[in-house]
Amino acid sequence: MSVFLETERLVLRPFTDDDADRLFALDDDPEVMRFINGGKPASRETIRSRILPRLLHDHPCIGTRGYWAAEEKATGAFLGWFEFRPLDEHSADVVELGYRLNRAAWGKGYATEGSRALIAKGFTDFGVQRVTANTMAVNTRSRRVMEKSGLVFLRNFTGDWPEAIPGSEHGEVEYVLTRADWEQRR
């Protein structure tokens, strides 16, 4: 197994085709998907044809992927994934931070731990200048992870939801962290 990044409790590794069943289980949980699509169940076909190809994509500007499978270091258990993806395929200046963890991993600090490690790697190894993250305004747990990871609230905005889901009427929020602010806080 190729390891992209390790923390005290996590191993982040590239996805493989063999992760399809793990991704299906993650995206099939209505609570995990509550703020993504209103909790609709996933289909195996969607995982294989749309989700997995996106997770396997290499970004030339950083020379690696933008999504990583997260495993618990002590047990090897699949916890979910982290995103640290350039918004522009040809520039690492601005990356989007994201995470999706299974319910068993919630409330244990894994999302913050993985996010902080990715942010540090991005600023020190990839030349990232700005990290951005967004979620639904009502997703207080995800907002808290963003704050604990060092990002600060930038704005509220209204997304173009193809289908309204509970809470979408409150809009979305964007959080950011610049390299200069990160370096100043170290």
Image (spheres, grey):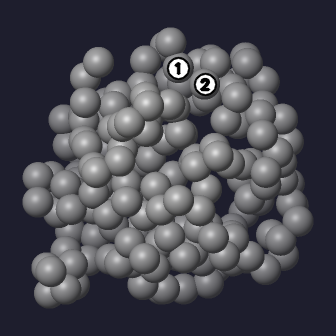
Residue beneath disc 2: 22
Horizontally, residue 146 falls left or right of residue 173, namely left
Where residue 56 sits in the image (x, y, percent)? 42, 25
The tag on residue 19 is 1
User: Could you tell me which secondary element the residue under label 1 belongs to?
Assistant: helix
Are the two marked residues, 2 and 1, in contact with CB atoms closer than 8 angstroms? yes
Q: Is residue 145 visible?
A: yes
In the rendered image, residue 76, in percent from the top left (x then y), is placed at: 43, 28
Q: Quadrant of residue 159?
A: bottom right
Q: In the structure shown, which secondary structural element does the residue marked by tag 2 occupy? A: helix
Image x and y of residue 114, in percent:
37, 54
Q: Residue furthest top?
A: 18
172 relative position to 17: left or right: right
Along the line of sight, the residue nearer the viewer: 24 or 163: 24
* Amino acid type, residue under disc 1 in the picture: Asp
**Res 74 label:** none
Looking at the image, which residue is at 51% across and 52% down?
A: 99
Q: CA distance from mark 2 to mark 1?
A: 5 Å
